[in-house]
């Protein structure tokens, strides 16, 4: 009688290898997790001058900027997220870096386009933000958060015009289509290709804090922005 050895069934080691995140993901997520509140500034001149790369999260009110920062940093309440639009009213900075050495900063900016804000406040804020985006010397990258169900609003377009010269000069730029969990696959793919045409040189990704979609990729991208010379 011939005996056929049983086929090697995938053992636990195989399963672990498949689930283990890539080393770059571990590094990027570990780095993100070091985030600490640094300071809050109601106006530009209150922001400390910093030498480390700064990455700003901008976008319409309620787009999910603060939630995105909390998701990336794996901290529940680092940035204040809320159902009430207009919750973030100052520029909040969070420092990143291992062993207490800050090597980058995330900036959570107040959202724009919230209807209930008085017009004078809106205009003031647009000015503050435009100044920030144009003059902040250590600004290295911008993450524009956009709810794909609304698409780019007029204020998003203004922002794109404001940052375009800096993007041409090398400022990193990423558009995140937020709350992707609210779209089916077809609509998500459609939103992605439309935005790729509109984003003018930036990369575009789908993101969902709820489903943790895009988290690893975005963490890795931001890590690379902040460490351009590291492998
Ligand atoms: N379904 C879903 N809801 C989300 C997601 N991200 C954020 N939200 C919700 O969207 C609302 C607004 O989120 P925030 O993170 O406060 O938005 P923001 O852009 O910081 O808003 P402002 O500070 O007003 O500019 C909250 O109710 C969040 O729970 C997501 O990925 N999926
Ligand atoms: Mg916010």
Image (tube, helix red, strand yellow):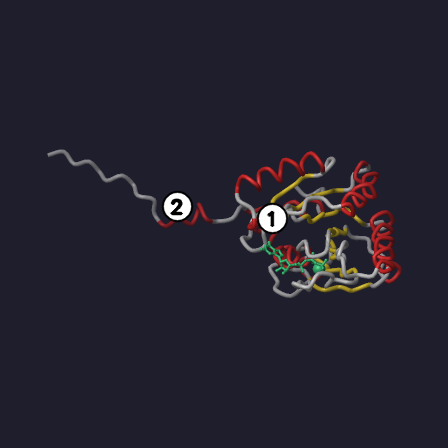
Residue drawn at (80%, 49%) of the image: 139
On the image, the x and y values in percent for residue 59 come to 73, 51
- Left/right of residue 90 with respect to residue 216 in the rendered view: right
**Callout 1 crowding tier (Cα within 10 Å): few <14, some 14–19, many ≥20:** many
Residue drawn at (67%, 36%) of the image: 196
> Split into 4 quadrants, where in the image is the N terminus?
top left
Q: Secondary structure at mark 2?
A: helix
Determine whether the beta carbon of the residue marked 1 sits less than 8 angstroms from the nearest atom of ligand 1.
yes
Q: Secondary structure at mark 1?
A: loop
Determine whether the beta carbon of the residue marked 2 sits less than 8 angstroms from the nearest atom of ligand 1.
no
Location of residue 193 by image quarter: top right
Residue drawn at (40%, 48%) of the image: 15
Instruction: Specify the label residue 31 is tagged with.
Output: none
159 or 139, which lies in front? 159
- Left/right of residue 163 with respect to residue 10 in the rendered view: right
Residue drawn at (48%, 49%) of the image: 20
- Left/right of residue 34 with respect to residue 157 in the rendered view: left
Tell me: residue 206, above or below residue 1. below
In primary-sequence order, the first of circles 2 and 1 is 2
**Callout 2 crowding tier (Cα within 10 Å): few <14, some 14–19, many ≥20:** few
Circle 1 is placed at which residue position?
207
Instruction: Specify the label residue 14 is tagged with.
Output: 2
């Amino acid at each position: 009688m011939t005996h056929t050895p049983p086929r090697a069934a995938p053992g636990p080691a195989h399963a672990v290898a498949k689930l283990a995140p890539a080393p770059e993901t571990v590094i990027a997520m570990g780095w993100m997790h070091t985030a600490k509140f640094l300071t809050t500034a109601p106006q530009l001149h209150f922001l400390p001058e910093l030498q480390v790369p700064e990455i700003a999260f901008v976008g319409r009110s309620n787009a999910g900027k603060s939630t995105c920062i909390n998701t990336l940093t794996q901290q529940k309440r680092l940035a204040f997220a809320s159902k009430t639009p207009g919750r973030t009213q100052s520029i909040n900075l969070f420092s990143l870096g291992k062993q207490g050495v800050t090597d980058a900063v995330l900036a959570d900016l107040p959202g724009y386009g919230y209807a209930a804000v008085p017009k004078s406040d809106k205009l003031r804020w647009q000015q503050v933000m435009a100044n920030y985006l144009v003059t902040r010397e250590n600004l290295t990258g911008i993450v524009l958060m956009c709810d794909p169900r609304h698409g780019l609003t007029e204020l998003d377009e203004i922002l794109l015009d404001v940052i375009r010269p800096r993007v041409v000069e090398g400022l990193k730029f990423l558009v995140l289509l937020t709350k992707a969990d609210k779209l089916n696959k077809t609509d998500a793919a459609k939103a992605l290709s439309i935005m790729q045409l509109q984003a003018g040189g930036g990369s575009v990704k789908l993101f969902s804090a709820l489903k943790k979609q895009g988290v690893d990729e975005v963490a890795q991208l931001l890590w690379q922005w902040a460490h351009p010379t590291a492998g």
